[in-house]
Amino acid sequence: MLGKLFGSLFKSGEPKAPESPVAQEDYKGFLILAEPRQVGGQWQIAGRILQEKDGEAREHVFIRADQLPTRDEAAEYMLRKARSMIDQQGDGIFR
């Protein structure tokens, strides 16, 4: 009985990815998809940075430990952070 109780408590804290991006943005030849994950009552910053180059699709999965109170705040933070990463690393994101 205790195992079921504690098991259900811990399961509720697992991140849940959205079925579709909350926001997306084309930025300097990259496609940024903001996909915050709900963890308990907070939203974890997460998403993907995509690019097609020389016929090859490339993807960088972006997950931070940071959590914010709303999905929209987490999505906006992800977009800002992804733009910054692209500015700093360019194609190096995919290495």
Image (tube, grey):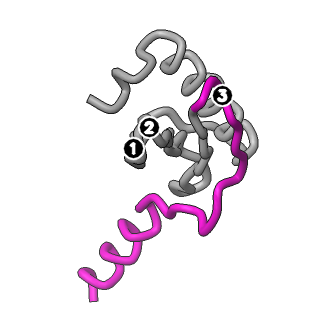
Is residue 79 rendered to the left or right of residue 94? right
Write down the residue under mark 2. 53
Magenta span covers which residues?
1-29
Q: Earlier in the sequence, mark 2 or mark 1?
A: 2
Within 10 Å of disc 2 (Cα), the crowding (few <14, some 14-19, many 20+) is: few
Image position of 91 with respect to 18: above or below: above
Which quadrant of the figure contains the N terminus?
bottom left
Secondary-structure class at tag 3: strand
Locate residue 62: give its quadrant: top left
Residue drawn at the location 75% of the way across and 43% of the way down: 72
Q: Disc 2 vs disc 1: Cβ atoms closer than 8 Å?
A: yes
Say which mark, if any, is on residue 77: none
Inter-mark Cα distance, 2 to 1: 8 Å
Write down the residue under mark 3. 27
The outermost residue toward the bottom is: 1
* Foreground of the two, 7 or 39: 39
Image position of 3 with respect to 20: above or below: below
Can residue 23 be found in the magenta stretch?
A: yes
Secondary-structure class at tag 1: strand
Q: Disc 1 vs disc 3: Cβ atoms closer than 8 Å?
A: no
Q: Please name the amino acid that badge 2 sits on.
A: Lys
Say which mark, if any, is on residue 58: 1
Secondary-structure class at tag 2: strand
Q: Disc 3 vs disc 2: Cβ atoms closer than 8 Å?
A: no
